[in-house]
Image (tube, rainbow, N blue to C red):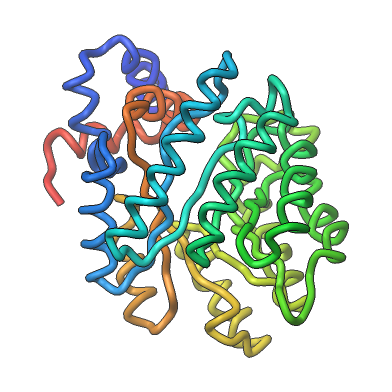
Amino acid sequence: MMWMNKMIAGMLPYMPKNFVWLFSKRYIAGKTIEDAIGVCKQLNDEGMMVTVDLLGEFITELHQAEDNKNQYLSIIENIQASGVNGNYSLKPTMFGLLIDKDVAYQYIREIVAKAASFNNFVRVDMEDSQCVDLEIELFRKLKAEFPKNVGLVLQAYLRRTLKDIENMLDLNTKEIPVNYRLCKGIYVEPEKIAYKKYLEINKHFLEDLEFMFKNKIYAAIATHDKPLVEGAYALIEKYKVPKEMYEFQMLYGVTPQLRTSIVEAGHRLRVYVPYGEQWFAYSTRRLKENPGMAMEIIKALFVRG
């Protein structure tokens, strides 16, 4: 079965876009801001918050960074005017992080300032290992100026993550807790720097989460893995974590039944809503990173719901 998954993953970039869209539309809100707003309002009606993400990453020219900045400023205006209950996520490489980190900082700062003007929030996504130190540095600078309006993503499969959380404890205060989204991690990394085994990654995910709860850090628990959800429930109960100090997070279109069960159990949940013209690159790249998703393509083509 693995060889078939890899074969489908390798073929997908060469297939007609309309064919790929049959699969992708289950996991992407659409190509326009109007599409994204429609999905966000539906999720709000179901009792879920959202975080909006414009698709794209790893640009090659700085003029693309300015275009992305202007799109994000427009997104914030549109989302705020729509009344959607949500915030924003962005990838620093979309703004030239690997080309000119100072330019990237200035553009992202403008976006965070725009969100802050509405008393809203921007999440800085964590990307592959070459970006980690740069993105922590970026986050520190933004947090100093906008303490309530910016958060960071951390990846439990990286061996360094618990130490990174410890090293950033100076950012955490009782008045304004630091805010992290904790996920497993999706980028392909060498075993020297990343845990590879399922149980090993889950173990470190829960260790990181427990450390966050012990230190009264706001935790956005990003997982579709039922054992991790149940492990998080146990830690929330163990440390009597108040509801305003955590939320669960899931990707749009993934494990909707588990998502609903979390909401019905009384926990806050936020859905990560990606959209944009870069949907094709996003879909083919994610499939290449995770060939096991190939069976989801087959289901998407022949099974509804």
Seen at 24% across and 24% down, the residue is: 20
Q: Is residue 102 left or right of residue 302?
A: right
Seen at 43% across and 55% down, the residue is: 51
Q: Is residue 155 above or below residue 99?
A: below
Seen at 58% across and 87% down, the residue is: 242
Residue 261: image location, x then y, percent: 33, 74
Q: Is residue 92 above or below residue 237?
A: above
Q: Nearer the viewer, residue 146 or 241?
A: 146
Seen at 81% across and 64% down, the residue is: 171
Residue 149: image location, x then y, percent: 61, 62
Quadrant housing residue 7? top left
Q: Is residue 116 above or below residue 274?
A: below
Q: Nearer the viewer, residue 6 or 62?
A: 62
In the image as oriented, which residue stretches furthest toward the top?
14
Q: Nearer the viewer, residue 193 or 126?
A: 126
Q: Is residue 149 above or below residue 96?
A: below
